[in-house]
Amino acid sequence: MIGILRARLRLGHQTIAFPGGAARLPARFRGRPALAPDRCAAGCAACADVCPTGAVLGTGAGGLAIDAGACVFCGRCQEACPARAIVFTRDHRLAMRAREELVVRGDAPTLARALDGRMRRLFGRSLKLRQVSAGGCGGCEAELNAAGNVQFDLGRFGIQFVASPRHADGLVVTGPVGANMRDALRRTWEATPAPRLLVAVGACAISGGVFAGSPVCGDGLDGAIDGVPVDLYVPGCPPHPVTLIDGLLRLLGRLEGDRPESLAGAP
Ligand code: SF4
């Protein structure tokens, strides 16, 4: 017993300081791309040519744009660009409220807007979510699991995953919403009491990701449940737990525009 207590004391406090302090992102983390369209050489489309998901929406001085909702953050476009017009920063703040806000251009980043006052009062201090894997590979699901571990401790914000949609305030959906999951997802949504939230996590749930265009795999959550709108999009392949936590806290109005320590040194 004494040995266990000593080991526990040696471990110390493991939970990250985020959002008050550093997010402790891994060295190879890729966050929001910073674009410099004025560096694009005329007629060059090297970035678009190597993109596996069609996430480079336009090239050139007037049109360079990346859809963070389709991007799998592979870094190929950055490597392919001789002018360094695309550089992936360590900015984890990728979650947005509207699909079109996920398109990154050369301008200043926007941040996810909060819910209206009534929804913030309802969910701001206690939010229970049911996760639905709608054809995901397991990557996003693993990161959602990680969000609840001792390092990220999503529960300290009053946000927890629950076992039944009947106990939930909303659904968190991963995967491209394949044909075999559509009915199950719709019935899970109907079993969730209103008012309720719908959150799309990962490139597949947002746009179909690498599966986009497949009639079997699906093109993501938009329109998958009889026109129900998505309340929060969390990009990534998979998203880092800090990106998820940041998005949920902004949605609940508990985190507003700031420059956390984790962004120090980012372009
Ligand atoms: S990082 Fe994103 S935009 Fe760039 S090539 Fe990969 S998927 Fe396409």
Image (tube, grey):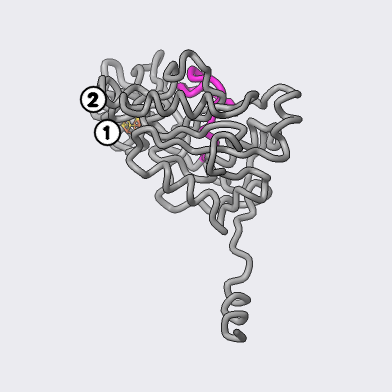
Q: Is mark 2 within 8 Å of ligand 1?
A: no
Q: Position of residue 54 (x, y in %)?
A: 30, 23
Q: Dot 2: within a 10 Å radius of its alpha carbon, few (fewer than 14), some, or many (20 or more) residues? A: few
- Quarter the N terminus occupies: bottom right
Q: Position of residue 182 (x, y in %)?
A: 38, 24
Q: Which mark is residue 49?
A: 2
Q: Position of residue 160 (x, y in %)?
A: 60, 45
Quarter for ligand 1?
top left
Q: Nearer the viewer, residue 9 or 230?
A: 230
Q: Amino acid at mark 1?
A: Ala
Residue numbers of the magenta segment: 91-111
**Res 93 → quadrant:** top right
Q: Give yes or no for residue 161 being in the magenta stretch.
A: no
**Res 64 → quadrant:** top left
Residue drawn at 67 percent across, 46 percent down: 157
Residue 235, can we see it? no
Residue drawn at 64 percent across, 33 percent down: 250
Would residue 47 appear left or right of 133 to someone viewing this image?
left
